[in-house]
Image (cartoon, helix red, strand yellow):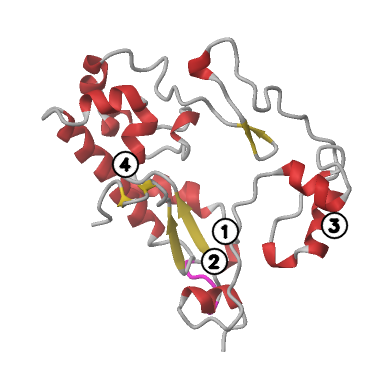
């Protein structure tokens, strides 16, 4: 019988106590709860938080070296369009995705995701990897797991892989909101979406070879009425 409670929960066989999954991103809350300044002593603070709330399952920093505090916090820069806010112990990127790459709809329609292939320098696309082939993708992802696992995760393990760029997120992050909305209903955009679909097929073919038992996908593009895009 597997001892990994998260595995059992994923399989729909969890116990009465649900496994907690917290997207934790508030150092100020950690400081308040523990009495230890997170930025001055990140490891000590997180260790104390683990003692107080072990169910969070938060990772412990490798060192206790002080961290730089976010520069902007919740303040905006002089340009209202490119402001950032605090995110975790750092800052968000701006929402000007694609800025510097795409200036017009013509730029979008000329772009080929497959010909470009390598997005490793495009930090605004979030999962900034080289997607030029199945093998290239696999080699990048495989490094995240112990070498001695081979091609299979330990039995009963909740080992998983998380992928952020759903079909909705690819064009949004690559081109930015404005150009995405301007172009998405045009016939020319179908070719671009077909190419992003092929990239994601490469991704999931690579994931299928990883030593993991579960795949977790980004799914929070929703409104109060449900998903913006049908999961099907």
Which structural element holds mark 3? Answer: helix
Which badge, 3 or 2, comes first in the chain's sequence? 3
Q: Are marks 3 and 2 in contact (CB under 8 Å)?
A: no
Q: Which residue is tagged 4?
A: 168
Crowding at dot 3, Cα within 10 Å, few <14 / some 14-19 / many 20+, comes out as some
Left or right of 209: which side holds 105?
A: left
State which mark lies toward you, 1 or 2. 2
Left or right of 64: which side holds 212?
A: left
Q: Are marks 1 and 2 in contact (CB under 8 Å)?
A: yes
Residue 5 in picture, x, y percent from top left:
60, 77
Residue drawn at point x = 68 percent, y = 27 percent? 73
The numbered disc on residue 159 is: 2
3D distance between C-alphas at marks 3 and 2: 26 Å
Which structural element holds mark 2? Answer: loop
Q: Decide whether the magenta segment is chiefly helix, strand or loop.
A: loop
3D distance between C-alphas at marks 1 and 2: 9 Å
Residue 200 in picture, x, y percent from top left:
31, 47
State which mark lies toward you, 3 or 2. 3
Q: Are marks 3 and 4 in contact (CB under 8 Å)?
A: no
- In this rendering, is residue 168 above or below 10? above
The numbered disc on residue 48 is: 3
Which structural element holds mark 4? Answer: loop
State which mark lies toward you, 4 or 1. 4
Residue drawn at point x = 20 percent, y = 22 percent? 109
The magenta stretch spans which residues?
151-156
3D distance between C-alphas at marks 1 and 3: 28 Å
């Amino acid at each position: 019988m597997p001892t990994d409670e998260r595995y059992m929960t994923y399989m729909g066989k969890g116990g009465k106590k649900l496994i907690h999954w917290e997207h934790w991103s508030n150092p100020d809350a950690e400081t308040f709860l523990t009495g230890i300044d997170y930025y001055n002593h990140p490891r000590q603070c997180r260790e104390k938080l683990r003692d107080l709330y072990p169910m969070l399952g938060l990772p412990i920093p490798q060192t206790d070296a002080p961290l730089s505090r976010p520069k902007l916090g919740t303040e905006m820069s002089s340009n209202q369009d490119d402001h950032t806010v605090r995110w975790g112990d750092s800052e968000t990127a701006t929402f000007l995705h694609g800025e510097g790459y795409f200036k017009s709809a013509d730029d979008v329609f000329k772009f080929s995701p497959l010909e470009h292939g390598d997005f490793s320098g495009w930090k605004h696309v979030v999962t900034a990897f080289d997607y030029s082939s199945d093998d290239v993708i696999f080699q990048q992802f495989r490094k995240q797991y112990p070498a001695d696992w081979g091609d299979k995760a330990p039995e009963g393990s909740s080992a998983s892989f998380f992928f952020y760029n759903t079909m909705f997120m690819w064009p949004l992050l690559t081109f930015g909101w404005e150009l995405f909305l301007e172009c998405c209903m045009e016939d020319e955009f179908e070719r671009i979406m077909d190419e992003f679909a092929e990239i994601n097929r490469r991704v999931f073919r690579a994931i299928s070879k990883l030593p993991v038992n579960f795949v977790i996908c980004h799914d929070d593009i929703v409104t109060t009425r449900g998903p913006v895009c049908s999961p099907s």
